[in-house]
Image: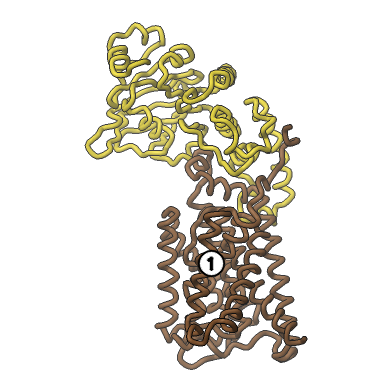
Chain colours: A brown, B yellow
Amino acid sequence: MIGVISYLVFFATTASILAIAVLGLNLQWGNTGLFNGGVVAFFGAGAYGTLILGGTPQAGHLGGYGLFYPLALLGGMAIAGLVAWIVGLLTLRLRHDYLAIATFGVAVAFENLMRNAEWLAGGAKGVRGFERPLRDALGDGFTYNIFFFLVVLVILIATYLFLERLVASPFGRLLRAIREDEEAAQSLGKNPARVRLMAFITGSVILGLAGGLYGTFYAFVSPQDVLPTLTFQIWAMLIVGGAGNNRGAIFGAFLIWGAWTASGWALSRFAPIEAQLYTGSVQFILIGSVIVGMLMWRPHGLLPERLVVSQRGKTPSA
Amino acid sequence: MSETILSTQGLCRSFGMLRAVNDVSLQVRRGSMTGLIGPNGAGKSTLFNLLTGALKPDSGSVQLDGRDVTGLPPDRLFSSGLGRTFQIPRPFARMSVLENVMLAPMGQTGETISGPFLFRNKMKSEETRIRAKALEVLDFVTLAPLADHPAGQISGGQMKLLELARVLMGDPALILLDEPAAGVNPVLTATLIGKIEELNRQGTTFVIIEHDMDFVMRHCDPVIALAEGSVIFEGTSAEALANPVLLDAYLGTTEDA
């Protein structure tokens, strides 16, 4: 029984961390229409940043600054934001598919940099020597996992509330206008380049927050954690849940992560021995099929965007 | 205040070998309803885009209210008092009609990331004011009953009224309309032109680009005609109808104008 609960806590923690990432992407894509194909670069910048800033000294690579944990996490978010600022200045003039290709390239470059620049982040071996905060007080067992889950849950709720208030404000209205028709928005005195950059950076900082929590959870990050697969998983969560709807983003994260975990379990349990080697690939095929299927039959997701969030008129007309 | 609100000197713009706008100098009188006509390919749209900042001229200059605004982007021109509508309406489709209109006012406190959190009271009082004004403007253009409708689901003519409403939120001194009558049913066209004339009486200057010569002759004065990128005529609508050069250039090349 405790095993099941323990597993559920583990599952819910990972899903909640991913939900935070999906919320970040939703601000970029769902609200502003920015096709970020390089989600893992910002997620990874947060993870690497947090672990390098908050970890113990390591021979051979950067790190060991041993910062107080919340500062390390904020630092990771800031690094993700900084990366987004640079990438944004270079690529945000691009539209849709071109932006997607450019940001995808950035993410692949990020992964390769992490894999090869050993002096920076330990190369393929990754960043070790990170002590999870409050481990001395809570130990490494079930109590710690419950505690960490609650922390992640609070951060998820705070992120959700922050974004809900943001998209219901004139700023959210501005983002939607840029998404709907940039040229029209510019003819009404708005500066699309500035707005796109702001939304891109803010979304990436949230992705960095998720990455920082992810790195903290495993007390380890390596290039294997920033593969393109994660970008596709996070995209699948947003598309299935419903782009433009924050509740949909969270729902999609839990649903897709659940389906991913369950399919992995089912394949390892029921697939013939000789096929076991390929279960990972089968999962990729499944996630790809889910994205394609949703886009074909339910493009607005299971919880579609609701219209009007900033202000209502008098009464709906009859 | 000078008599001229908008003027251009020697405005040129080419696309490859084609000189779309060739040495255009014109003046728009404050308070006028200036019509800009010309056959297809005369350079009307290019000139319009040069005036609204959507395109930058190769050479020449544009003055708005006596200030040089050559090459300024559309957002800066809007804040200088120049509003525009589009030939094919461009509503923010997945936003309500009201939200479309509330977007337009400049410098809103809530339009930054920190605004909705740090300056909440200021933002709320601004929102109340903007919303009231937006409903007033929607009422003026007869769209108030549709305030909560998705802007992408109203008719084409209503979209043109919506674009006018959005622009009015910026209290522009000059409004450029790109083919306001094109593709709109006659009833809504009458509503639209009625509102435009009412605004014009209150002092707003209009420049109307129109393919429909009849429309321009009835509602605009003066009339400026373009052909092959150059101004070929400037005068009253009565003079335009009597001008052989214009009639030849215009009526000669289109079948049913």
Q: Position of residue B67 (x, y in %)?
A: 44, 33
Instruction: Name the image quarter holding residue A26.
Output: bottom right
Q: Position of residue A200 (x, y in %)?
A: 53, 59
Q: Please tell me whether residue A23 is drawn above or below residue B29 in the rendered image.
A: below
The secondary structure type at the circle numbered 1 is helix
What residue appears at the point 43 percent right and 66 percent down from the top-left corner? Answer: A104
Q: Residues within 10 Å of mark 1 (few under 14, many from 20)?
A: many
Tell which residue pokes out farthest to the left in this image. B17
Judging depth in this view, the residue of A110 and A13 nearest the camera is: A13
What residue appears at the point 48 percent right and 86 percent down from the top-left corner? Answer: A274
What amino acid type should be assigned to the residue bearing mark 1?
Gly
Tell which residue pokes out farthest to the front in this image. A272
Instruction: Return the residue at label 1.
Output: A81
Q: Please tell me whether residue B236 is drawn above or below residue A169 in the rendered image.
A: above
Identify the chain of the residue marked 1, using the numbered disc in the image: A
Q: Position of residue A301 (x, y in %)?
A: 60, 56
Quadrant into which the C terminus of chain A falls: top right
